[in-house]
Image (cartoon, grey):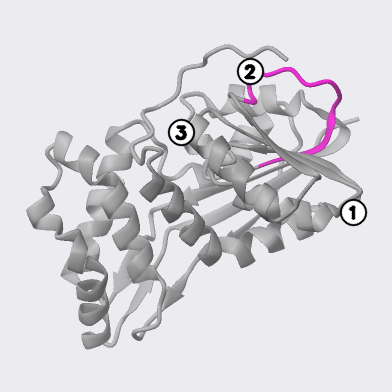
Amino acid sequence: MKEKASPQSTYALGHSEQELERLSRQAQAFEPFTRQLLQEAGIATAMNVLDVGCGSGDVAFLAADLVGPTGEVIGADRAAAAVQRATARAEARNLRHVKFLEGDPAEMQFDRPFDAVVGRLVLMYYPDPVNTVRRLASHVREGGLVIFQEFDMANFRSLPRVPIFERHADWIKQTFSATGARTQLGLEMYSVFVAAGLPGPTMRMDAIVGGGPECPAYELVSDVTGSLLPAMEKLNIATATEVDVSSLAQRLRDEVVAAKGVALSPALIGSWSRKSR
């Protein structure tokens, strides 16, 4: 297996232990949406699946649950820390049909084609999503599945508009955009699939929305802000004092609840298509 470096945007969230733990907390919130996407797209027993940008392994574990022990899941990530954490989690779960590799799967070569390639919140960090999808689709057998779930941050907001939520949502979007991430790639995925030579995908949209003190959006915003804070300061978008991440989740909660409002996460746009025979 050979792998060569490929250019990507700056991954502003980093790969610290704190960030990898954040990814797992985020994965718990998004798990129902991703599970529904994979099931609706056709991930099933005995398939072999490639998970792109596996992070801490959560999407790979979802796929492993769907394909069962007669299937196989390979997760790949450019960050050694992510691969190490995902591998340790797989071993702790005794998942022998899941393994993780360090590298960019768009540049790797594999011994055999996959039944499906999947990814969540990964294409938004590639400078050329079309070429990336084309390369990843080359790993998929004819008739196999290509499945991605990407953000559309346009409706990441509160209603009524709560100043603290709107300010931090804007800082998050500014930081992602300034570091090269595509904050509305989810809605671009139809044209990305077609330009990559795939049939136009079926698409679905999911989001976390809710009011009251139990809504998970407050912690999600606080967690992302904490991971992005070094980049925010470097880019002069916000300072640690302005953010005050230690009390951020509670302040978000207090203001949304006081306004009798709702908080809306970025939309997760799922797209899937079968590689033409």
Q: Between tags 2 and 3, which lies in front?
A: 2
Mark-to-mark CA distance, 2 and 1: 27 Å
Mark-to-mark CA distance, 2 and 3: 15 Å
Q: Picture coordinates of residue 116 (x, y %)?
A: 79, 39
Which region of the structure is painted magenta?
A: 105-118
Residue 191 sits in which quadrant?
top right
Q: Regarding mark 1 in the picture, which secondary structure is present there?
A: loop
Would you say residue 112 sits in the magenta stretch?
Answer: yes
- Residue 119 tag number: none
Q: Between tags 1 and 3, which lies in front?
A: 1
- Residue 125 tag number: 3
How packed mark 2 is, by other alpha carbons closer than 10 Å (few <14, some 14-19, many 20 or more), is some
Q: Picture coordinates of residue 39 (x, y %)?
A: 77, 59
**Residue ID at (48%, 50%):** 151
Q: Which amino acid does the dot numbered 3 rest on? A: Tyr
- Please say if the residues under marks 1 and 3 sit with CB atoms less than 8 Å apart: no
**Residue denoted by label 1:** 45
Residue 44 sits in which quadrant?
bottom right
**Residue denoted by label 2:** 107
Residue 253 lies left or right of residue 190; in this view the side is left
Residue 19 lies left or right of residue 202; in this view the side is left
Foreground residue among 175 and 247 = 247
Query: Between disc 1 and disc 3, whose residue precedes?
Result: 1
Foreground residue among 55 and 188 = 55
Magenta span: predominant SS is loop
